């Protein structure tokens, strides 16, 4: 009898132990990252194509096939390309061998953005026409993400370009999510189509600097955007931080710049989640992973990945973070993997993590961060239904069917020519000068930029004031020692003579001159000449 009781007690204890086992941890990035490519310059978008090809847009103006290590497209149809941003493949690729690129360029009157179509030959991309033009740009708050939705339409994010009257103006293209057909025309079922003009393209409005778009398995569109960073037109009490995750409803107003974060305003949609005043996340992208049902938002300022678990009501059940040590920009779910790009100038990388059950390294919060779910909220305009993709329909480009981890491709380590690295650094300095204006340069007393990829040696950055019939005057100069190809900060300090000269000018013709001298004594020089105003002026886009 005693033996039977002992056996029964053992069974009860065993069952208790089983019931006490912790629930399986959610899926997420595990293990060490696999490095796919290095030596890239600010990779902004990653697109996977059939046959194992992977394309990356590099912001200075290249599309590179990292699986082959070759540049497959540089735009020669405009004189001054400022940057390449979003890239999306046609939903029926490769049967329809087209890709779409968001490009910012200078047309001689100022910066503007457009969407161009490219033809994919299988080994290179060729220009195939402009499908949408006339999006204003301030070279900074451009939005720039493009993605095909499960409905086969092209969605485009545009920034507010620091002009507060435009995001909530439905007839202006800035501060919006736009929706268009693959040929660039406006779909008749867009929520504001009946208003005519640019409103025909508007899917949602009241955005500041939208950066990520992703659809979940229910066909819902999620978006990440940067919160305020101290601009004068930010709402009172919310001038910094408050990066957002939004559930996008057609025809709705998301409030910028009237409200941000926890602030509420009748007729506007509040974010599902926001980062609070600090620390900022500065989301670079947003990825939905069918493998684990999570949203992943890599961060620039926060150098971390924010993880969201959506609930069934249009909100989020919980949030978590994965700490990393580098700035991260692009995030793409590819089967059971998460592909990320780092944002370190000419020394940027592409890496991938496996998504599998187990200890994911996600630090979960007990409750979601402050925010409000727009579940059940509808705008005053009719909301057209978007059917979720059926299991038999092709998956969107960035959301292929879940699969096991792919074999590790050979790591591409590309050594870019020193002249390209120097040219990229000079362009960044020129962009900084245009944005800052002479007054800010004089107040700070220094011009700086980050650059990587230079061979060991030294880099001299010099700014010269060009004057008619007089010798150029050095207004700022600095030398930085380079010990490796890792990113360094290049600085040019304003000289006393330069300060006196610039104070008297409303505008100036400035030459940016960069000289890299390797340890062997070989010199690489790049120069750019530009006009800089005392105060930066906003670009007025064409209608």
Image (cartoon, helix red, strand yellow):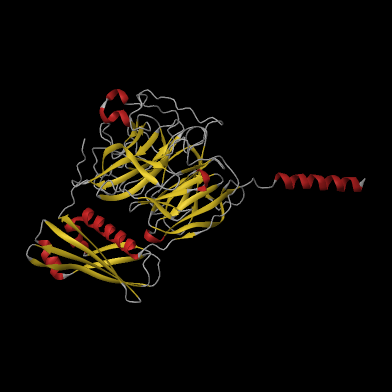
Q: Name the spot of residue 344 as percent of width and height, x first.
A: 39, 59
Quarter of the figure that contains the C terminus: top left
Q: Quadrant of the N terminus?
A: top right
Using the rendered image of the protein, determine whether residue 522 is visible from the camera's viewpoint.
yes
- Classify residue 143 as left or right of residue 151: left
Image position, residue 44 (x, y; %):
39, 50
Asked if residue 143 can be seen in this view, the reply is no
Q: Is residue 355 left or right of residue 368?
A: right
| Residue at image coords 17%, 58% | 438
Query: Is 429 or 38 nearer to us in this picture?
Result: 38
Q: Nearer the viewer, residue 539 or 54?
A: 54
> Measured along the vertical axis of the image, is residue 286 above or below residue 186?
below
Q: Residue furthest right?
A: 1
480 sits to left or right of 405: left
Callout count: 0
Outermost left residue? 469
Q: Residue at x 53, y 57 (%)?
A: 410
Question: Of residues 525 and 318, which is closer to you in this image?
Answer: 525
Q: Residue at x 47, y 52 (%)?
A: 340
Report x, y in % for residue 147: 41, 39
Instruction: Give percent across and percent down for residue 354.
Output: 56, 51
Give the image quarter of residue 260.
top left
Q: Reply above or below: 115 against 353.
A: above
Hey, which quadrant is residue 101 in on the image? top left
């Amino acid at each position: 009898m005693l033996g039977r009781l002992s056996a029964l007690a053992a069974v009860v204890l065993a069952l208790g132990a089983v019931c006490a086992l912790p629930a399986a941890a959610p899926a997420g990035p595990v293990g060490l990252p696999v490095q796919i490519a290095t030596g890239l310059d600010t990779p902004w978008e990653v697109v996977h194509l059939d046959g194992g090809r992977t394309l990356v847009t590099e912001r200075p103006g290249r599309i590179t096939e990292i699986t082959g290590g070759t540049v497959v497209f540089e735009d020669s149809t405009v004189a001054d390309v400022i940057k390449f941003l979003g890239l999306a493949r046609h939903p029926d690729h490769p049967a329809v061998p087209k890709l779409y690129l968001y490009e910012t360029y200078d047309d001689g009157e100022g910066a503007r953005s457009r969407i161009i179509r490219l033809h994919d030959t299988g080994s290179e991309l060729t220009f195939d026409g402009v499908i949408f033009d006339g999006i204003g740009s301030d070279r900074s708050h451009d939005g720039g993400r493009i993605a095909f939705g499960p409905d086969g339409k092209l969605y485009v994010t545009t920034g507010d370009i620091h002009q507060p009257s435009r995001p909530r103006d439905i007839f202006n293209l800035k501060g919006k999510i736009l929706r268009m057909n693959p040929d660039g025309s406006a779909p008749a079922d867009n929520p504001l189509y009946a208003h005519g003009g640019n409103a025909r393209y508007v899917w949602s409005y009241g955005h500041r600097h939208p950066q990520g778009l992703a659809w979940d398995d229910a066909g819902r569109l999620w978006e990440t955007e940067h919160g305020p960073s101290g601009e004068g037109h930010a709402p009172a009490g919310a001038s910094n931080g408050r990066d957002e995750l939004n559930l996008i409803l057609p025809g709705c107003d998301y409030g910028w710049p009237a409200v941000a974060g926890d602030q509420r305003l009748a007729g506007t949609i509040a974010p599902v989640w926001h980062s609070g005043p600090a620390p900022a996340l500065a989301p670079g992208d947003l990825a939905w992973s069918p493998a684990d049902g999570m949203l992943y938002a890599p961060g620039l300022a926060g150098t971390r990945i924010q993880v969201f678990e959506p609930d069934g009501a249009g909100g989020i059940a919980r949030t978590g973070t994965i700490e990393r040590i580098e700035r991260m920009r692009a995030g793409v779910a590819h089967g059971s993997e998460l592909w990320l790009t780092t944002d370190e100038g000419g020394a940027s990388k592409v890496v991938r993590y496996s998504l599998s059950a187990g200890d994911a390294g996600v630090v979960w919060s007990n409750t979601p961060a402050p925010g409000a779910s727009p579940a059940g909220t509808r705008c005053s305009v009719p909301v057209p239904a978007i059917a979720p993709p059926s299991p038999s329909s092709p998956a969107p480009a960035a959301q292929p069917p879940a699969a096991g981890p792919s074999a590790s491709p050979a790591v591409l380590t590309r050594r870019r020519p020193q002249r390209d690295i120097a040219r990229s650094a000079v362009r960044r300095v020129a962009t900084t000068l245009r944005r800052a204006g002479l007054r800010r340069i004089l107040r700070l007393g220094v011009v700086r930029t980050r650059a990587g990829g230079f061979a060991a040696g030294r880099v001299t950055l010099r700014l010269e004031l060009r004057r008619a019939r007089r010798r150029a005057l050095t207004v700022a100069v600095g030398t930085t020692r380079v010990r490796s190809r890792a990113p360094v900060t290049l600085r040019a300090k304003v000289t006393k003579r330069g300060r006196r000269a610039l104070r008297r000018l409303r505008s100036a013709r400035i030459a940016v001159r960069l000289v890299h001298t390797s340890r062997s004594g070989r010199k690489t020089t790049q120069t750019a000449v530009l006009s800089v105003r005392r105060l930066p002026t906003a670009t007025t886009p064409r209608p």
